[in-house]
Amino acid sequence: MPLPTRPSQPLVLICGLDHTGIAEEAAVLTAAGVPFRRVPARTEDGYLSECGEADGLLVQYGAFSRRVIEGLPRLRVLVRYGVGVDGVDLDAATERGIPVVNVPDYGTDEVANHAVALLLALVRKITRLDRQTRAGGWDVFRVGPITRFAGRTVGILGCGRIGAGVAGKLAGFDVRLLGCDPYISTFPPRVQPVSFDRLLAESDYLTVHCPMTAETHHLIDARALGLMRPTAVLINTARGGIVDTAALVEALQTGSLAGAGLDVLEPEPLDPRSPLLSMEHVIVTPHAAWYSEEGRSDLKRRAAEEAVRVLHGERPLNCVNLAALGRLRAR
């Protein structure tokens, strides 16, 4: 049970969360002597009306604009369940000395596995064969052609933790690996660094693992898709907004792209009327790449631990806006 709130103690609110329980968070916060409560807020208005007394927030969903950040007078730390913080106004948080903290590596292996699973399912046309067989068919040639994976080129856009994990998992396949990432100097083993345009032009399979930022929003747009081979396949397990969905649909409908494996979309959830859902050469999963029971438990525990660190005057392990730490100490 949540501890009773005392004015002298910081309060953590857990909100914007679709997990059924909060046992992991409760264990961490209770052991640290930090009062907490779960509230249903997950919109800007909800955060403003329900979270005004919070010193710390653990948040899965919802946008934190300047309006929200400036409207929460007691807020000292904002912890995001997961990696992406694209919904948070980092400038506003930094100005107020509020560290924005994420958990960047809780599901690295899961996401890398999911990306490779989507890729291989499209290589072998597994979902199409499954649907045909369930419908009473028994003819591999109806979904042809299926081409050999060996000798193909896999492009990795973003070679951080997850991109490197994908490269490692593909090391046992006889494929050529290309990588593009302007923010690293050392690439994973067997990955050849190339420019963005060359990555697009030479990849038979392109898998996206870069963060969602102003720079990467719609990075895969009509121009980028136009540089890809008509036989190429796109995999996205990063963020939906990195790919221009309308441009992707057009490329798939006109045959200028051979297929796609999508775990993330813009917007989410995907409109059930989306043409993507009627395309045999597309696999869509519901933002599931991060999920395993072990990964979810790690995420919940580590998010709560980060809140405790900041509220106890310690440095968080994964602060996205480092400049806020100096402002926090000066307050």
Image (spheres, rainbow, N blue to C red):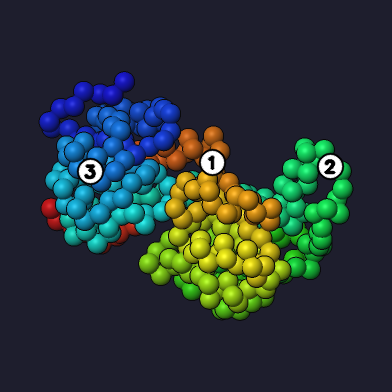
**Disc 3 target residue:** 45
Q: Position of residue 235 (x, y in %)?
A: 61, 59
- Verify CB contact (< 8 Å) between mark 2 and mark 1: no
- Verify CB contact (< 8 Å) between mark 3 and mark 1: no
What element does badge 3 sit on? helix
Relative to 86, does residue 204 appear above or below in the rendering?
Answer: below
Q: Whole-Å distance between the Cαs marked 3 and 1?
A: 29 Å
User: Could you tell me the amino acid type at mark 2?
Assistant: Gly
**Disc 2 target residue:** 137
Regarding residue 276, the answer to whether it shows in the image is: yes
Q: Is residue 209 left or right of residue 47?
A: right
Q: Position of residue 36 (x, y in %)?
A: 27, 30
* Quadrant position of residue 90: bottom left
Q: Whole-Å distance between the Cαs marked 2 and 1?
A: 33 Å
Relative to 85, does residue 60 appear above or below in the rendering?
Answer: above
Dot 2 or dot 1: first in sequence order is 2
**Disc 1 target residue:** 291
At a point 21% along the width and 49% down the height, the residue shown is 68
Dot 3 or dot 1: first in sequence order is 3
Q: Position of residue 66 (x, y in %)?
A: 21, 56
At a point 63% along the width and 51% down the height, the residue shown is 278
Dot 3 or dot 2: first in sequence order is 3
